[in-house]
Amino acid sequence: MALEKLSDENMVWFYREELGKVDRGANIMSLIPKPIRRRMTRLGILERRKGLDKAFGFIISPRGRKILEDYKNARELEGDEG
């Protein structure tokens, strides 16, 4: 596994609760610091989208969702084995 990929996955795992809140509609500005938002955007974990009111917001990208799902599935498997 590439070191960069592992780092991306660790970042998503560390901010998993905040990303879940963002996915449910919470304001990302108060949850995740600006440097982290920038890094997640550059890594393709977050995407900037323009809303109907022309304001920009963030959504979790398909790549970010896949990482979250992979971790969720891995946690479920660990629970079954333990």
Image (cartoon, rainbow, N blue to C red):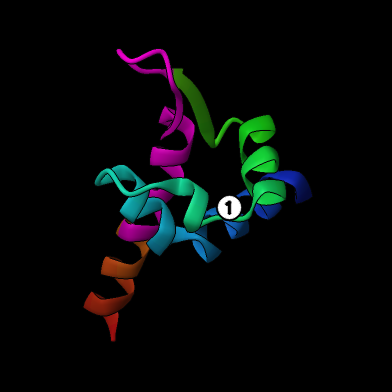
* Side of 52 relative to 55 (left or right): left
Residue named by callout 1: 9
Query: Is residue 1 among the parts visible in the rendering?
Result: no
Q: Residue at x 66, y 47 (%)?
A: 34
Q: Residue at x 48, y 58 (%)?
A: 31
Residues 47 and 33: in front is: 33
Three-letter amino acid code at the position of disc 1:
Glu
In the picture shown, does residue 76 fall above or below 18? below
Is 75 included in the stretch rendered in magenta? Answer: no
Is 58 included in the stretch rendered in magenta? Answer: yes
Query: Residue 1, how many percent across, how many down?
Result: 69, 48
In which quadrant is the C terminus drawn? bottom left
Q: Residue at x 53, y 53 (%)?
A: 12
Residues 44 and 23: in front is: 23
Query: Residue 16, how many percent across, how many down?
Result: 43, 59
Occupied quadrant, residue 11:
bottom right
Task: Label 1, secondary structure: give it.
Answer: helix
Tell me where the magenta segment starts and ends, as one range: 50-72
Query: Residue 60, how many percent across, how many down?
Result: 42, 36
Query: Residue 22, how many percent across, how many down?
Result: 36, 47
Disc 1 crowd, CA 10 A, few/some/many (<14, 14-19, 20+): some
* Side of 37 relative to 82 (left or right): right
